[in-house]
Amino acid sequence: MILLEGKNVAKVYENDRGLKEASFQLQAGRILALVGGNGAGKSTLIRLLTGQEKQQSGEIIWHQPQTIRFMPDDVNFPTMLTAAEILELLASLKQVDKYEQENVLKRVSLWDVRKQRAKHFSKGMLQRLNLAQSLLGNGSLLILDEPTNGLDPFWIAQLKNMMLEEKKKGNTVIFSTHLLSFAEEIADDVLVLHEGEIIISGAISEIFLQENSTSLEEIWLKRLNL
Ligand SMILES: Nc1ncnc2c1ncn2[C@@H]1O[C@H](COP(=O)(O)OP(=O)(O)OP(=O)(O)O)[C@@H](O)[C@H]1O
């Protein structure tokens, strides 16, 4: 089932970077990887999907209205607050009760340190708090911008499980990453961006069949004639 369609969607900044006339279809109930190098346009596309920015031209047509849960890549928590206070603040915006807050803090192993101020947290702990806030609530579309940033291999494996749990519940997951292997392992669909343009898109299994390859890296390099 189609979740949304983008038709010639463009958001180009003054430096001529951003997203250039992208057309795409995203499927509901699946895991989609937005892949690309630095500055490829992944976060720009995510900001358009979350409504943080508006495209300059083209349109995004939602076939199914969604409540979005979002994990940004550049979160600035008020670190004078404790982890529990930060989560409570964000939970109140989503009207999420104490029980769910406790569950989610346990899920990311921050329950024992919930009374510590976030300024004493490591990068990985802050990223887990960021993940925790995105898991709160019932939004059927979970968007994660570079969720593996700062996470060690154990937590990357946990993150994978959480994403698969979301899919099992019937939710849609969209995430951005530089890590092709992570995308291959977890995603059903992929959209590869390069300098603001989509160079590969579709179901990963079908792309592998068509390209007679089982490596996104190989296909990506071939597309770029490298
Ligand atoms: N607010 C902005 N003003 C000017 N240029 C911007 C702005 N936001 C993004 N850009 C430019 O658009 C391009 C795409 O940026 P974007 O953040 O979407 O890339 P990305 O694929 O998420 O990259 P990264 O992996 O490095 O986070 C970049 O070259 C960046 O310089």
Image: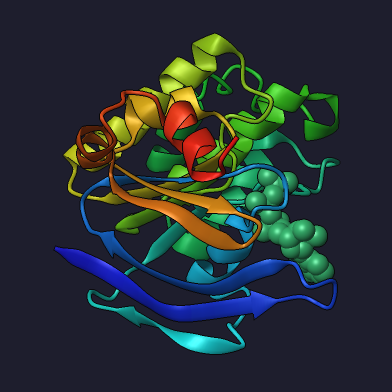
Residue 162 sits in quarter:
top left
| Quadrant holding the C terminus | top right
Identity of the residue furthest to the front in this view: 225
Residue 207 sits in quarter:
top left
Left or right: 17 as drawn, with respect to 225: right
**Which residue is found at the position 43% from the left and 19% from the top?**
158
Above/below status of 119 relative to 185: below
Name the one closer to the observer, 140 or 177. 177
The percent coordinates of residue 39 (x first, y second) are 72, 52
- Residue 24 visible in the shown view: yes
Identity of the residue furthest to the bottom in this view: 57
Identity of the residue furthest to the top in this view: 154
Name the one closer to the observer, 212 or 58. 212
| Quadrant holding the N terminus | bottom left
The percent coordinates of residue 20 (x first, y second) are 59, 72
Left or right: 118 as drawn, with respect to 31: right
The percent coordinates of residue 205 (x first, y second) are 21, 35
- Residue 102 visible in the shown view: no
Ligand 1 lies in which image quarter?
A: bottom right
Q: How is the rendered protein coloured? A: rainbow
**Which residue is found at the position 58% from the left and 44% from the top?**
36
Above/below status of 60 relative to 169: below
**Callout count:** 0
The percent coordinates of residue 166 (x first, y second) are 28, 40
Left or right: 1 as drawn, with respect to 225: left
**Which residue is found at the position 22% from the left and 40% from the top?**
210
**Which residue is found at the position 61% from the left and 73% from the top?**
52
Above/below status of 205 relative to 64: above
